[in-house]
Image (cartoon, rainbow, N blue to C red):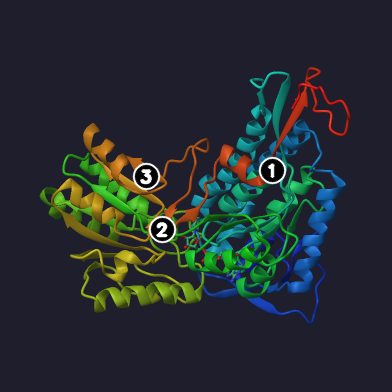
Amino acid sequence: MTEIQQLLADREIILPEVITGHVGGTAVAIDPQANRHAVYFPGTGERIAFLQEDNITAVTNAVHCARNSFDNGDWSSAPTSSRQAVFRRAATLIREHAEELALMECLCAGLPASHLASRQIPRAADNLDFFADYIGVMAGETFEQLAGYQTSVTRQPAGVAALFAPWNAPLALASMQIASCLAFGNTCVLKPSEFTPVSVLKMVNLLEQAGLPPGTINVVNGSGTVTGAALASSPDINRIAFTGGSSTARHVMAAAANQLTPVHFELGGKSANIIFDDADFDRAVDGSLVNIFSNSGQICIAGSRILVQRSIAARFVAAFVERTQALKVGDPLDPATEVGPMAFKTHWQRVLDHIAKAKLEGATLLCGGEPLTKLGDGYFVAPTVFQVNSNRLSLCQEEVFGPVVSIQIFDEDEEAFSLANDSRFGLVGYCWTNSLARSQAFRQKVDAGTLWVNTPLARDLRAPFGGFKESGIGRDGPRQAAEFFTEEKATITAIDKVPIRKMGETTNTDAGK
Ligand code: NAD
């Protein structure tokens, strides 16, 4: 028995040898003819399971199931109080199973398990609770200004949604898509990343255990180019919500265009983290480390371009590099680990390629810059800091999605804002200052969907989240989700005997012309 098998056995967790999709409330049967992908533990490179790939026939079947489930009304016509109760029960179950879910996610994504159990898994429960609350206070609109009429505006669920989730925060992100979509009565077909299918399937089981009718969520598994492409081009989908890379989004949008399916995109970033000379220095150092090294750098909101004002630059660089070198990199199952491995081997290689290119392009390596092979066969990269003189380097323009950060010095505030905006992305931005005027200028001038002042990564679920430019289309958020996942309907009722034009009468003296 391997260490991982022992770990799972100790906790009575059953990981099937072949992971399949989940349709109509049950696991899809194993098909010996279907393609299979291996799923690896990034901490050691050990294979932990196989994933059975759903082809176009299997995807069509899942979409039909979601459609039938939508049409039968068990969920789409369920009273709000029933949907709230299911979400709340599921949130409780997720909290109760946090350790198990964290372990499953750690084994596929390699994210530090302690961080998963304490932050990301509870976040999945919070997302469900939040939407349960929101649908309880949502209201329609009524207009009475038109004399003799009452116009009411109501919403109904859009239908069947295709949800695409990435691998970098599988449950935290898939749960946001699921909660935003199901809260309003839709059904869905979810396509998790092929690298991290396990925890998502467990969460779907918990939702069904909480009372979600079978067929409301269906899961298809497999690669993006086979399973994902089949789902994106399905003619029977009413909405597509996609979280992933900007280049993949182009394929999804092209497929959606054939059916004119509305899309919601949460995509990549290359965000600036500006440290002004009047910042609380220690907090700025602490926050900047969290901004780039959380999730082992594999996070869309990474503050991957540090811009620091000249008068404090030398001190900041020294402190930041010292702390980076002290980060605990290693086994993601170890509670002490702060930075784990890259989630899969080709991504690991991609991060190393970015580092090699940065060196070639003349970025100055301050620390890291190499694979950590001394940690074994896992996909580890040493936390890496480069100093750069130009924002035009690939390192400053391409999303590395790993523990790699650039530091650039600026003089004037305006220069920092313009460097921040010199990007095809516009997801988030950070700034550290004690000046109200500077923080206001930052808010006005930096083009990004979320801006943080003097804090890393705090998120209020009531506020919209999403990106400018190539970082996305649309916003996550309660009102925004209601707009995307429902169809609005205006109903105009005559509340008086308002005159109607009498067409076809020979003596038409009616006033209602
Ligand atoms: P990805 O684009 O490779 O994959 C996302 C999903 O799309 C996966 O399920 C994948 O299998 C599927 N897919 C891939 N090719 C497809 C195709 N041709 N047709 C249909 N589906 C396809 O992204 P990833 O590597 O899993 O995630 C990392 C990216 O996600 C980064 O760019 C990151 O910034 C972004 N991200 C954005 C947010 C946000 O909220 N803005 C959050 C997390 C991650």
* Residue at the extreme left: 311
Residue at the disc numbered 3: 456
Question: Alpha carbon of mark 2 to alpha carbon of mark 3: how far?
Answer: 15 Å
Image position of 17 with respect to 71: above or below? below
Q: Which numbered circle lies on residue 268? A: none
Q: Which quadrant would the C terminus be assigned to in this image?
A: top right
> Can you identify the residue that label 1 sits on?
487
Q: In the rendered view, does 75 fall on the left or right side of 123?
A: right
Q: Secondary structure at mark 1?
A: strand
Residue visible at 25% across and 56% down? 419
Secondary structure of residue under mark 2: loop
Please give left or right for residue 78 compared with residue 180 in the image.
Answer: right
Residue 417: image location, x then y, percent:
25, 49
Picture quarter containing residue 8? bottom right
Residue 269 is labelled as: 2
Task: Please rate how many residues cluster around mark 2, counting C-alpha atoms within 10 Å: few if below 14, some from 14 to 19, many from 20.
Answer: many
Residue 119, image x and y in percent? Answer: 51, 46
Q: Are marks 1 and 3 in contact (CB under 8 Å)?
A: no
Residue labelled 2 has its Cβ within 8 Å of some atom of ligand 1: yes
x 52%, y 49%: residue:
474
Residue 261: image quadrant is: bottom right
In the image as oriented, which residue stretches furthest toward the front? Answer: 507
Q: How many marks?
A: 3
Q: Quadrant of the N terminus?
A: bottom right
Mark 2 or mark 1: name the one nearer the start of the chain: 2
Q: CA distance from mark 1 to mark 3?
A: 36 Å
